[in-house]
Each structure stands twice: as structure tokens, then as C-alpha cells.
Image (tube, rainbow, N blue to C red):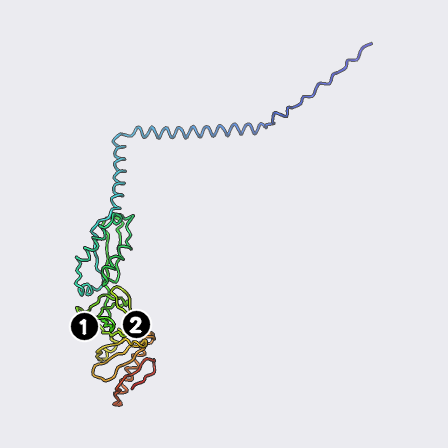
């Protein structure tokens, strides 16, 4: 009998787990991307090679000329940072103060020149301290209200601008000998005012005991403004002032007038009412004249709108 052929079942192929599956699309794009990167790199390399060869093909004299121009630019930049030791001096404002102390332009110029030669740090725009130099000049010359130093953007000559102070009062202190010239800011300019025309500034006798030191501020600008206003208003009305006194007892300004036996009291504490106090006195003065009344001691106008006399 025929034997039945036994059909062997073919063994199933098993895919190795060690071999990762990779899609055709992934392989295609990966190889395509890598090709693009390589092509771009080769293109950049070619451009660099072409630029290098272009530089090599330039004439030698052109390369030398470019180098010389670059060196000249660097040299000019370095030279522009160097400052001159002879700055330009500018005197602004009223020069009468400098004439009073016999300070000439040459003296200010010499002092400025010395400042710029004292240190190597003052000879460069990078290292110079203009504020410190300005303060030194202000201390050396108390009659100057301010000093400023400016540096040029292009050039080597710095500009030193000095502004003389504006004298306001001639003060005689009972606690110190001599007289003092005080500016509008209350700063003492000098310990003598003999050279200044005495009829041009109000004269004050200070009984408060304050020490007057040249270069320091001893009075408030508001007090000086008050005194200047009293002086100018009296002059405008034809009233001659012989002297003014700062009382030691209170914030009181006593004004002595030529030709009368009384003095006028004003309140420095109330600086905002200076015009009203002056107006009160002028109205009272006119009233007393009309009624033939002459105070023998004082007229008190320290309270605006009210007046007392004795």
C-alpha cells in the first residue's frame, strides 16, 4: 500500500529581535538630510577658500595701504584722548568781584595750568576727575561762585569756566575785627571790604556772635534777600539808611535811618512777608508825618499789617 507522504511543516522564520526595524521612509530621509548637510558644508568651505584666494590675489600695495589706514585711525583715537596742560579759561558773569581782589585772568590761568600738570591722570580724558579739579579752584579762590571744567569731544584743550560771586553785603562783626564781604548765597568772600565802594552795598552790624570764615556760608540766602529788599525799597523812596543791625536777642533786623531819632524793627523770621512789613512801615511813616508825630525810640513793623511805635 502506498505510504502517505508526510508533509513537513516548514519552519516559521523568526525575525531577530536584535535587528531594529527601520522604515524605508526613515532611511530615505535620513540619507537625504545627511547629504544636504554635507553639501552645505562643502559649499561653505568653497566660499571660504574663494575669499582667501581673493585676499591673496589683492595687490600687495593695497594690503599695505589698508594696514596703514588702520594704524592711522588707532593713532588718532589715542592722540584724541590726550589733554593739553594749558586749558582755555572763560570768565562768565560779573567780573567786578575779580577786580575787587585784584585777581587777573593770568592768575586764574596759571592756577588752572598747575592743576593740569600735577598728575598724569589729568592728562587723559579717561582718567581725569573734572569735579575734583573744579573744587580745588573754588577753594583756592573764594570769590568764585562756581567752577566747571568741560572736555572737548574732539580736540585736546579742556575749557575751565569760572563764575565770580555776586557781593551782597558788607558785614561788621562785633566778635571779630574788620569787616567781611558776603555774597548773595551767604558765603564769606573776604575778611576785608575796604577796596569795595562802600556806597554800593548795604552795611550790616552783626551782634549775633557768628564767626565769619572766608569761604564758608554764615548767613541764609533768604535773610540776604530780605536785607537787599529793605535797602532797595528805602532807596526807591528816598530814605537814607545809615546802618542795619542783626540783633543778638532774636531774628530781628534793626534799620537806622538818617535824620530821625528812631529805628525800624523788621522780623527776619517771617521772610515771606518782607514786602508787607516794608509796606506797613512806609504807610505808618506817612501817617506819622501827616499827623506831626515823631517817635523817639522805634517803629515796630515785625508783624505784617500791624505797627507799634514808641
Question: In the picture provided, is 169 more to the left or to the right than 48?
Answer: left
Q: Nearer the viewer, residue 266 or 96?
A: 266
Q: Which residue is mark 1?
A: 198
The N terminus - image quarter: top right
Callout count: 2
Q: Is residue 40 above or below residue 7?
A: below
Picture disc at residue 119: none
Spot occupied by residue 282 in the image (x, y as percentages of width and height): 28, 82
Tell me: residue 6, above or below residue 34: above
**Image quarter in which the C terminus is found:** bottom left
Report whether 94 appears left or right of 18: left
**Residue at the spot of label 2:** 223
Residue at (80% x, 11% y) in the render? 3
Q: CA distance from mark 1 to mark 2?
A: 20 Å
Residue most extreme to the top:
1
Check disc 2: other Cα within 10 Å, few if <14, some if 14-19, many if 20+: many
Percent across and percent down for residue 249 are 31, 77
Label 2: state its secondary structure.
helix
Residue 192 coordinates in the image, percent (x, y): 20, 68
Amino acid at each position: 500500500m502506498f505510504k502517505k507522504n508526510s508533509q513537513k511543516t516548514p519552519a516559521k522564520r523568526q525575525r531577530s529581535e536584535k535587528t531594529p526595524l527601520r522604515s524605508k521612509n526613515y532611511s530615505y530621509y535620513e540619507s537625504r538630510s545627511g547629504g544636504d548637510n554635507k553639501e552645505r558644508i562643502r559649499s561653505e568651505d568653497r566660499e571660504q577658500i574663494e575669499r582667501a584666494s581673493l585676499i591673496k590675489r589683492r595687490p600687495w600695495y593695497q594690503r599695505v595701504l589698508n594696514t596703514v589706514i588702520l594704524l592711522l585711525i588707532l593713532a588718532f583715537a589715542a592722540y584724541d584722548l590726550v589733554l593739553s596742560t594749558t586749558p582755555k579759561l572763560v570768565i562768565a558773569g560779573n567780573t567786578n568781584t575779580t577786580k575787587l581782589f585784584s585777581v587777573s585772568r593770568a592768575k586764574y590761568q596759571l592756577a588752572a595750568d598747575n592743576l593740569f600738570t600735577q598728575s598724569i591722570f589729568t592728562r587723559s580724558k579717561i582718567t581725569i576727575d573734572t569735579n575734583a579739579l573744579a573744587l580745588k579752584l573754588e577753594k583756592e579762590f573764594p570769590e568764585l561762585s562756581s567752577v566747571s571744567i568741560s572736555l572737548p569731544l574732539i580736540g585736546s584743550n579742556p575749557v575751565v569756566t569760572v563764575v565770580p560771586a555776586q557781593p551782597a553785603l558788607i558785614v561788621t562783626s562785633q566778635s571779630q575785627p574788620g569787616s567781611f564781604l558776603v555774597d548773595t548765597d551767604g558765603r564769606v568772600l573776604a575778611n576785608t571790604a575796604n577796596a569795595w565802594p562802600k556806597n554800593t552795598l548795604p552795611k550790616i552790624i552783626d551782634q549775633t556772635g557768628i564767626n565769619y570764615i572766608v569761604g564758608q556760608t554764615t548767613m541764609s540766602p533768604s535773610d540776604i534777600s530780605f536785607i537787599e529788599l529793605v535797602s532797595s525799597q528805602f532807596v526807591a523812596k528816598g530814605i537814607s539808611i545809615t546802618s542795619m543791625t542783626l540783633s543778638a536777642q532774636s531774628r530781628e533786623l534793626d534799620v537806622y535811618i538818617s535824620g530821625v531819632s528812631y529805628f525800624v524793627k523788621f522780623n527776619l523770621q517771617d521772610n515771606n512777608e518782607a514786602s508787607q512789613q516794608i509796606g506797613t512801615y512806609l504807610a505808618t511813616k506817612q501817617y506819622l508825618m501827616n499827623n506831626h508825630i515823631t517817635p523817639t525810640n522805634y517803629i515796630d513793623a515785625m508783624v505784617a499789617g500791624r505797627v507799634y511805635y514808641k
